[in-house]
Image (cartoon, grey):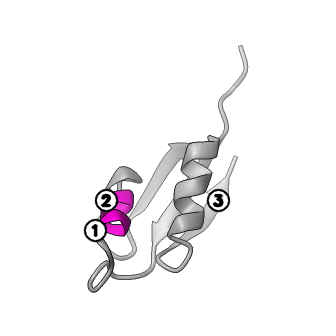
Amino acid sequence: MAKTKTVTVEQIGSPIRRTGDQRATLVGLGLNKIRRQSTLEDTPAVRGMIAKLGHLVRVVGAE
């Protein structure tokens, strides 16, 4: 059985004065407060969400 790859992201920016879709994407990543981290399955959809919020999140680690 193959181990699924994961990526850990951390919120580094505030969603204040951001568009509603950016706020919704943060919630979709499981983030809502600065410095909060979330570990997610590394899929193209998650990578796209991270790319969309490159100014609000950073990748802490990937396995």
> Hey, which quadrant is residue 58 in on the image?
bottom right
Q: State which region is magenta.
A: 20-26
Q: Secondary structure at mark 3?
A: strand
Front of the two marks 1 and 2: 1
Is most of the magenta stretch helix, strand or loop?
helix
Q: Are marks 2 and 3 in contact (CB under 8 Å)?
A: no
Which class describes the residues within 10 Å of circle 3: few (<14), some (14-19), or many (20+)? Answer: few
Q: What residue would you read off at disc 2?
A: 24
Amino acid of disc 2: Ala
Q: Is residue 21 left or right of residue 50?
A: left
Q: What residue would you read off at disc 1?
A: 20
Compared to 41, does 10 lie above or below? below
Q: Secondary structure at mark 1?
A: helix
Amino acid of disc 3: Gly
Q: Residue at x 44, y 54 (%)?
A: 38
Q: What residue would you read off at disc 3?
A: 61
Percent x, y for residue 14? 33, 82
Which badge, 1 or 3, comes first in the chain's sequence?
A: 1
Q: Quadrant of the N terminus?
A: top right
As drawn, which residue projects farthest toward the bottom? Answer: 17
Front of the two marks 1 and 3: 1
Q: Mark yes or no: residue 42 visible.
A: no
Compared to 53, does 1 lie above or below? above
Q: Secondary structure at mark 2?
A: helix
- Residue 6: say if magenta: no
Q: Which mark is residue 43?
A: none
Q: Residue at x 70, y 46 (%)?
A: 63
CA–CA distance in space, label 1 to label 2: 6 Å
Front of the two marks 2 and 3: 2
Observer-nearest of 21 and 15: 21
Q: Are marks 1 and 2 in contact (CB under 8 Å)?
A: yes
CA–CA distance in space, label 1 to label 3: 27 Å
